[in-house]
Amino acid sequence: MAAVVRKPAALRQGGRIAVVMPSGPVLRENLAAGMAALERHGFEVVPPPEREPHRLFSAGDAERLADLRAAFADPSNDVVWCARGGWGAQRLLPGLDSAWLRERGRLCVGFSDATALLSHLVEHAGVAALHGPMVAHDVAREDASGRLAEMLALLQGKAEWSVPVPETLIPGEVRAPVRGGCLTVLAALAGTPWQPSFRDAIAFFEDVAERPQRRIDRMLTQLLQAGAFAGVRGFVFGTMLDCGPSEELRETILGGIGELGVPVGFGAPVGHGPINLPVPLGLPAQLVLPSKGGGTLGGNEPMVRL
């Protein structure tokens, strides 16, 4: 694990955004809508190369890896922004050298399956990343709501960030870096060279269509028994879309990690839901969870190097 997490350079006004597809294929109309939204805000957007889909991937492993490396290698790119999730990013990790990524230090944005890439950047390359909307997934929707402008301001170092955490499961207050993303992807990394560690960090998780009593419990248990939660400082669960009844989900979470004795929040509007607020990964944040009601997770310093 990298000892110090660096802030990447800020997105310049009028700067260049390279769109990548490390996971599944996209509907071209969705990709075009997301790119157009970014262009309306004054940025140059470079589309991903057109590739022939392979199985359930946007292209073969070698092609996707080459495109990803090219996006990080190009010094004119301010941001490497994932198009969509699905599955496939984890397959590319052996070809992404940590020192090489750290030297380039590009801003990277994504969520869902892109969690594998973001986790590698933060934990092993030591470069902060942004868990947030993807170009062909929900950028156009976030633009229509006005939230995209707020996220772009964050990438430019012009804004602080904060997300509400509606429910307190275990109260407390802690300041620590945030790490995490899609629970399914992070659990799949357990036992690999890219296994996540949440030591001295706030663990953030979101997911979609995973049943609580078997799958969610299984994944939390897997990470716990793999040692990933040793020294964890707190937990925040985001949108758990179609993951079963809320009461059953809360019971499963507390049954899995409640005995760790750290603050636990639930229901942040982040992830596979109608609102996907951005969360910087790898940088200090403040988690405040009062005993009654909900709280907040946020940071008051720029997530980028200005």
Image (cartoon, helix red, strand yellow):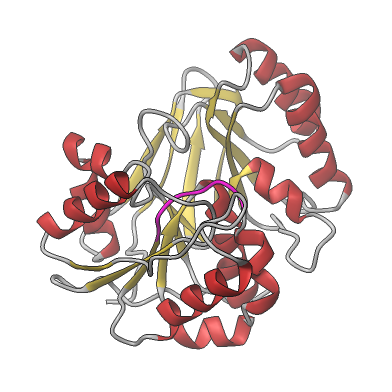
Q: Measured along the vertical axis of the image, is residue 250 above or below residue 4?
A: above
**Is residue 86 in view from this perspective?**
yes
Which of the two residues, 147 or 173, is positioned nearer the viewer here?
147
Counting from the top left corner in percent of width and height, residue 182 is at 59, 44
Q: Residue furthest front?
A: 52
**In the image: residue 55, left or right of residue 147:** right
Residue 7, x across and y down, in percent: 42, 73
Q: Quadrant of the N terminus?
A: bottom right
Q: Nearer the viewer, residue 198 or 213?
A: 213
Any magenta on residue 35?
no
Q: Residue at x 72, y 58 (%)?
A: 197
In the rendered view, tell whether residue 185 sits above or below residue 88.
Answer: above
Quadrant location, the C terminus: bottom left
Provide the major secondary structure of the magenta segment.
loop
The magenta stretch spans residue 86: yes
* Residue appearing at x 26%, y 37% in the figure: 141
Magenta-highlighted residues: 82-87
